[in-house]
Image: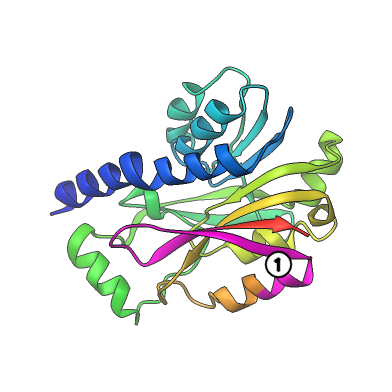
Amino acid sequence: MKIIFLFFYNFFENFFHLVRIKKFIKKNIHLTNPTIFDIGAHKGKLSKMFHEVYEDSSIYCFEPNIFLHKYIEKVSQNIKIYDYAAGDQSEEKEFSLNNIDLTSSLSTLNKKSFYLKIKNFIIDASPANSKKKIKVITLDKFCKDKDIKEIDFLKVDVEGYELMVLKGAKEMIRNVKYIMIEIQKNNMYQEYSKEKIEDFLQKNNFRLIKKFNFPFMFFQDCLYEKL
């Protein structure tokens, strides 16, 4: 069951979902020498897309699961990879390496979630026994340390931890042009609130310009532009 699910998931992601995103960005978002942050890079599929659209880009990938770095490294030698996470404060935190690496996260699963029970039945999304302490850093501190003045495109996909990433960029958010963030349409994670994410973005003068619904799944990638 898990193998079948992953086959169709990757098929729809590679040949439908990412194709739509790439086509829209290429047509509507014209950037020169952009600085791009890929928070929750996973295997680097979005970084690969960004590199293909903006060949002159500087891409910073955050991916705590070091076993996935070998995939990201294949995208481009110019991509910088960091083995820690972004959050609302700089700290060490326990990271769950789940049975399906797509679902590994700092977030706490809501065990009462009907969606989680269905997902567990199909692919076993429950946490594995493997957990590790990882470094978490705020984007404000990271950008200050690296002397990064602005982010042209910020992509955030961190399995329910998106609001914490945004809260850690309270200063830097003023200098971000575009944000693409995964929005959950389920209650799989404790204390997750898409309303709070949307409220944070609105208060920081971002407007929604496009939604990309993932086929047959309960989440979407939402693209915001700074007003």
Q: Specify whether residue 65 is in view.
A: no
Q: In the image, is residue 28 above or below residue 197? A: above
Locate residue 20 relative to residue 146 in the image: left or right. left
Q: From which residue to which does the magenta span run?
A: 199-222
Q: Residue furthest front?
A: 27
* Residue occupying image coordinates x 30% and y 52%: 99
Residue 194 visible in this rendered orientation of the protein? yes
Task: Give 197 or 63, whichever is nearer the viewer.
Answer: 197
Q: Is residue 5 magenta?
A: no
Q: Which residue is the site of mark 1?
A: 201
Q: Secondary structure at mark 1?
A: helix
Of the pair 215 and 125, the residue shown nearer to us: 215
Asked whether 154 or 68 is in front, the reply is 154
Quadrant containing the C terminus in the rendered view? bottom right
Task: Indicate the quadrant containing the N terminus: top left, top right, bottom left or bottom right.
Answer: bottom left
x, y percentage for residue 214? 37, 57
**The disc labelled 1 sits on which kind of residue?**
Leu
